[in-house]
Image (cartoon, rainbow, N blue to C red):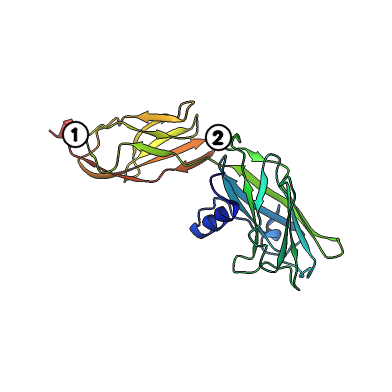
Amino acid sequence: MKTSSKTAAAGLVAAGVLVGAGLLSGPSAAAVDGRDDSVLWGSVTIPPGREGVLEVAGPTGSDPGAGATLTLTAPAGTRVTGLPLGAAGFTATLAADGRDAAYTAAGTSARPPGPAGTFPFVLAMPVDAVPGTRLSGCTLRLTDARGALRASGACQVTVGLAEPVLTRPEPGVPLGPRPEIGGTAHPGAQITVLDQEEAEVCSTSAEADGHWSCVPGPALPPGGNRLQAVATLNGVSATSEQIQITVTDAPAAAR
């Protein structure tokens, strides 16, 4: 992985870039507003080869107290790489294969601290995961100190899409009205380049090696502008960072 589990968890939470947020929910609205505390639920979307934080809400009913344990079984192919809440009144346990991980309340309360009130689990997505796939086998169990089941549920883990990268044109270099635009993205992704008004500049698909390029159809207007690439594949999408450009030549129609 590109980052350690602790760095990934801290960075993602601090930057607010998590695609999915965990919540106590379930098949009915009753689970959402707290009338059903027997269903646990969490969701997250993670691109291939990346780490993300699955947030699971604590119990909304009576507090199961000291010794209560929340156990996550991760979907096949993924693994838990970090338990950031392990030093906040909870003992963290991680299986050697990373499939099972748990928080056990060491104090008198089994409720997670902080305004979010959630239990974070850092999950690593395999590099060969297919974007848009919802992985099965993610389960949650909450037991009290005697081992009695207090709540259970599932978690939705979706394979996301890595952000495309714009490598051409280079920012700050004066351009003609129809510059070649290119970069890299997940192989097979549909790429749409947008300007500062979110109008389509050009579109194409990423090749098998991930590279892509396209040329604007209508000429870009002279002056400053911004370009951004949006990648879409199997129902999931990701957006590149914006680059600033300056077009010095006027479109042919304006000459």
The label shown at residue 251 is 1
Give me the residue at 59% from left, 56% from top: 6
Q: Earlier along the polypeptide chain: callout 1 or callout 2?
A: 2
Percent of width and height locating residue 68: 79, 64
Q: Residues within 10 Å of mark 2 (few under 14, many from 20)?
A: some
Residue 92: quarter of image: bottom right
Give me the residue at 37% from left, 29% from top: 213
Give me the residue at 27% from left, 32% from top: 179
**Label 2 sits on residue:** 234
Percent of width and height locating residue 20: 58, 51
Q: Is residue 36 left or right of residue 212?
A: right
Q: Residue furthest bottom?
A: 108
Percent of width and height locating residue 103: 73, 60
Q: Residue furthest top?
A: 208
Residue 239: quarter of image: top left
Residue 183: quarter of image: top left
Q: Quadrant of the N terminus?
A: top right
Q: Is residue 144 left or right of residue 129?
A: right
Type of amino acid at the residue the image marks with label 2: Asn
